[in-house]
Image (cartoon, rainbow, N blue to C red):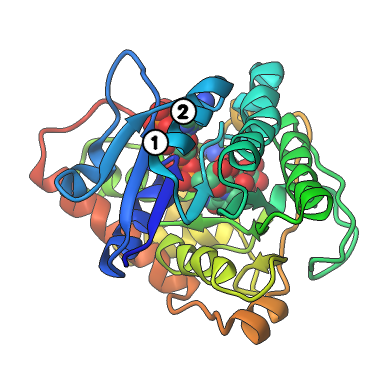
Amino acid sequence: MSQTAIITGITGQDGSYLAEFLLDKGYRVVGVVRRSSAPNLWRIEHLLDRVELRSADLLDQLSLVRLMDEVRPDEFYNLAAMSFVPASWDTPLLTGEFNSQGVTRVLEAIRHVKPDTRMYQASSSEMYGKVRAVPQSEDTPFHPRSPYGVSKVFGHYITVNYRESYGMFACSGILFNHESPRRGLEFVTRKVTDGVARIKLGLADSLPLGNLDARRDWGFAGDYIKAMWLMLQQATPDDYVVATGETHPVRELVEIAFGHVGLDWERYVKVDARFLRPAEVDLLIGDPTKARTQLGWTPDVDFPALVKMMVEADVARLEKAAVPAQPLA
Ligand code: NDP
Ligand code: GDR
């Protein structure tokens, strides 16, 4: 009998890779889309004849109960969130509704309809925030630095709490930054690789950025979604850090990306105060020992290969297509 999985956030970066991965394993994949003014299906267009899409929203408890009742899944991957950190200062209450209470609504729907469903919650290294230990592991205390980070701490602990309170198979993956050619244009890796491609092709002459000194542990999204699945295949539910164990400053990202097309980044990158944050997360570096030893998970794509993959994809896209509108951020 094939397994059935629900993915919230299937239209996002991770949802699209996870859907591909589960379909290849023979799963029936049901993706949750929310009604918006315009459909956002570009990341899963190639999968539309293989996935089932259903309408539900993390803000609407009944829609999630109905979804659970109709699909009765074996696994539930809760990837939906307001995921852009700067936007969380603009809409802190809504961010909490999505990322905190949205998780509770998912857990409640599972608990009431089919409590043996295995559930994955997309937690984040942003929960660590202010540096309390290097590298950061499952035991490092949290000190989030944005409404987004705070909202994810709630999502993490409510997942742990439902596991401990009701014996649910609920896992929280503390994933460090992971990127790909499908990353949203507002995140720094994609903003840089898109900017490099535009400059290379004569479509732009500069790239405004914020803090070049922030350091992140960046991996490839296609590797990270495998860890999500592995967590739900274990004998007991648990929480895991998923990271490469390496950290790099934004400056190095920029150097590699411009260098890959033979350009000197210092001629094009302009530091622009609009992209600085009210409170910054200076240094993230994860300790993936538990994921490696207990899940057998290791990433395949290293940082320079990731940046090159993204630059090449953006150059190819812009060469081929009519030029899309400038990125928003
Ligand atoms: P994206 O921003 O690419 O995707 C977010 C998804 O959530 C979209 O499909 C979006 O749908 C959906 N969504 C947002 N709000 C709602 C809602 N109210 N109801 C239903 N769906 C909603 O994120 P990523 O794929 O990068 O990340 C996936 C998850 O992992 C997120 O929870 C993120 O916070 C978390 N995470 C990501 C990391 C990363 O580096 N990428 C690292 C650690 C955690 P729509 O298309 O309608 O906007
Ligand atoms: P982050 O990712 O906030 O870590 O959250 P982002 O790519 O937005 O920022 C990474 C770092 O780069 C610095 N930076 C800039 N960032 C953006 N977006 N734009 C710029 O112009 C710029 N210049 C410098 C930032 O200050 C920051 O230090 C991502 C999201 O996917 C979250 O959902 C996820 O939980 C975490 O990763 C782990």
- Is residue 135 visible to us here? yes
Image quadrant holding the N terminus, namely bottom left
In front of the other: 225 or 72: 72
- Label for residue 70? 1
Picture layout, residue 112 above or below residue 283: above
Place residue 163 in its image quadrant.
bottom right
- Is residue 212 visible to us here? no
Residue 178, horizontal then vertical, whole percent = 51, 58
- Label for residue 66? 2
Picture layout, residue 221 above or below residue 197: below
In front of the other: 210 or 245: 245
Q: CA distance from mark 1 to mark 2?
A: 6 Å
Place residue 202 in its image quadrant.
top left
Residue 65, horizontal then vertical, whole percent = 53, 30
> Quarter of the picture for ligand 2?
top right
Drawn side of residue 148 relative to residue 74, left or right: right
Residue 311, horizontal then vertical, whole percent = 31, 57
Mark 1 closeness class: few <14, some 14–19, many ≥20 residues within 10 Å: few
Query: Which amino acid, mark 2?
Result: Arg
